[in-house]
């Protein structure tokens, strides 16, 4: 047997694990499914949109001015004829924000002009993240968003 990642090992043994389970029941299958769903999540390639709001081409989106008004719908009371362009930008930002899988990351440029995403205690250069999988950052103290949890278990 060759040395392989745990995620590959679990994937290779999926059917055997379920079949051999002494509690071969729906509850056991449900439990194993959660393990396999999480396994698949860990194998996903990282992309910038998992950390911060980006458009479909992974260009970083700037939060529109007065975005909180848009979210709370206050702008409808203040001026029902708000700029359509502003509303479009807010909607695009909201869609991008809803795709984020890891909480509290922010974007910044280091002194050497290297672009990074970071949370307290962890900095990830953007150029490096493109070659990584979710599994590669599990040793960091990263919290999942509700979307990530839903994506894993639903």
Image: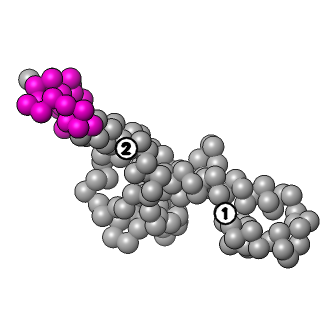
Q: Residue at x 27, y 37 (%)?
A: 30
Please state the extent of the stretch shown in magenta in the rendering: 3-30
In whole angstroms, how far apart are the C-alphas of marks 1 and 2?
Answer: 31 Å
Quadrant containing the N terminus is: top left
Residue that label 1 marks: 62
Image quadrant where residue 130 sits: top left
Q: Residue at x 10, y 25 (%)?
A: 20
Foreground pick, 105 / 25: 25
Q: Is residue 81 left or right of residue 56?
A: right
Is 16 in the magenta?
yes
How far across and how far down the image is residue 79, in percent? 89, 72
* Secondary structure beneath label 1: loop
Foreground pick, 6 / 116: 6
Image quadrant where residue 89 sits: bottom right
Foreground pick, 77 / 24: 24
Which disc, if any, is residue 96? none
Which disc, if any, is residue 153? 2
How far across and how far down the image is residue 38, in percent? 31, 42
Quadrant containing the C terminus is: top left
Main secondary structure along the magenta-highlighted residues: helix
Foreground pick, 122 / 22: 22
Q: How many marks?
A: 2
Q: Residue at x 49, y 70 (%)?
A: 111
Identify the residue at the far bottom of this view.
78
Is the image coloured rainbow, by chain, by secondary structure, or in one colour?
one colour
């Amino acid at each position: 047997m060759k040395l392989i990642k745990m995620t590959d090992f679990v994937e290779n043994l999926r059917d055997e694990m379920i079949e051999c389970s002494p509690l071969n029941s729906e509850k056991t299958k449900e439990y194993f499914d959660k393990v396999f769903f999480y396994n698949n999540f860990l194998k996903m390639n990282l992309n910038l949109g998992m950390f911060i709001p980006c458009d479909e081409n992974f260009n970083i989106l700037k939060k529109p001015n007065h975005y909180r008004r848009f979210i709370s719908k206050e702008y409808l009371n203040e001026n029902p004829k708000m700029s359509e362009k502003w509303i479009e930008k807010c909607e695009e930002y909201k869609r991008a924000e809803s795709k984020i899988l890891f909480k509290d990351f922010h974007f910044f440029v280091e002194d050497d002009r290297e672009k990074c995403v970071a949370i307290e205690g962890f900095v990830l250069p953007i150029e490096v993240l493109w070659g990584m999988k979710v599994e590669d950052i599990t040793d960091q103290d990263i919290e999942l968003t509700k979307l990530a949890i839903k994506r894993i278990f639903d």
